[in-house]
Image (cartoon, rainbow, N blue to C red):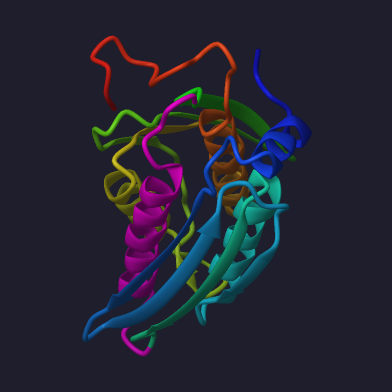
Amino acid sequence: MTETNRERDERKGQGSLPSRTAVVERNTAETKIRLALNLDGSGEGEISTGIGFFDHMLHGFAKHGFFDLSLRAEGDLEVDTHHTAEDVGIVLGRAIREAVGDKKGIIRYGTCILPMDDALILCSLDLCGRPYLSWDVRLDRERVGQLETEMIREFFYAVSYGGEMNLHVKQLDGFNNHHIIEGAFKAFAKALDMAVGYDRRITGVLSTKGTL
């Protein structure tokens, strides 16, 4: 039986569950990033990347996944948004991988079909330790706000590889680019929240190999 957030919190208070947090930093000639993630949070976000629309999407990810996310990123935005968006994806993926720990007791798989006005987005993922991204999303604008729309795929690609997860994102319907992108971030949040949830029937890791 899948645990509710309240049951999970009660067990954490009894010391039977580990704290699932991570702090990851990445400093290069192109970006300087510090990210803190709590998988068992309440949806609080303190986010600054210098890209307004990107901040909005990451706030949605935190809120709808019930993750606490603190992120400060400084990048070479005078060039474009590529390095910032991609490197934030790398760092977020690594933080997810570190925070989830040994994966004992977690559901491992998560799926969400999320409506966002005209858009309908499917996200399905597996925290299997094998990175892969399948991306079937159609965006026909060059930018939304300051963010180049081609960077949405690059962000999720970086998350999938940094997090060593199998990640599928598919657009089932929609025409408004803002709604499609926001639906993708929220569907990812809901699917990840499901995957990192605990199931009392799982005593080790959910794998016939005995490891993930």
Q: Quadrant of the C terminus?
A: top left
Residue 151 in magenta stretch: no
Residue 139 seen by the camera: yes
Q: In this view, does 117 lie to the left or right of 49?
A: right
78 lies above or below 130: below
Residue 182 image point, x, y percent = 61, 50
Please state if 11 lies on the left or on the right of 49 as rendered. Answer: right
Q: Position of residue 189 (x, y in %)?
A: 58, 43
Q: Going by the picture, which residue comes out furthest to the front?
A: 14
- Front position in the image: 92 or 121: 92
Give the magenta part as a residue range: 78-105
The residue depicted at 58 percent of the width and 30 percent of the height is 197
Where residue 77 sits: x, y (%)?
Answer: 39, 85
Residue 116 occupies quadrant: top right
Residue 155 visible in the snapshot: no
In this rendering, the answer to whether 23 lies above or below 201 is below
Q: How many labels does the image show?
A: 0
Left or right side of 128 for 148: right
Q: Main secondary structure of the magenta part?
A: helix
Q: Going by the picture, which residue comes out furthest to the right?
A: 6
Residue at the (40%, 19%) spot, across then down:
204
Q: In which quarter of the image is residue 209?
A: top left
- Quadrant housing the N terminus: top right
Q: Does the magenta stretch include residue 103?
A: yes
Residue 116 lies, with reference to residue 35, above or below; the image says above
Q: Which residue lies at the image location 65% right of the left edge and 19% below the top edge?
A: 2
Give the image location of residue 205, x and y in percent: 38, 21
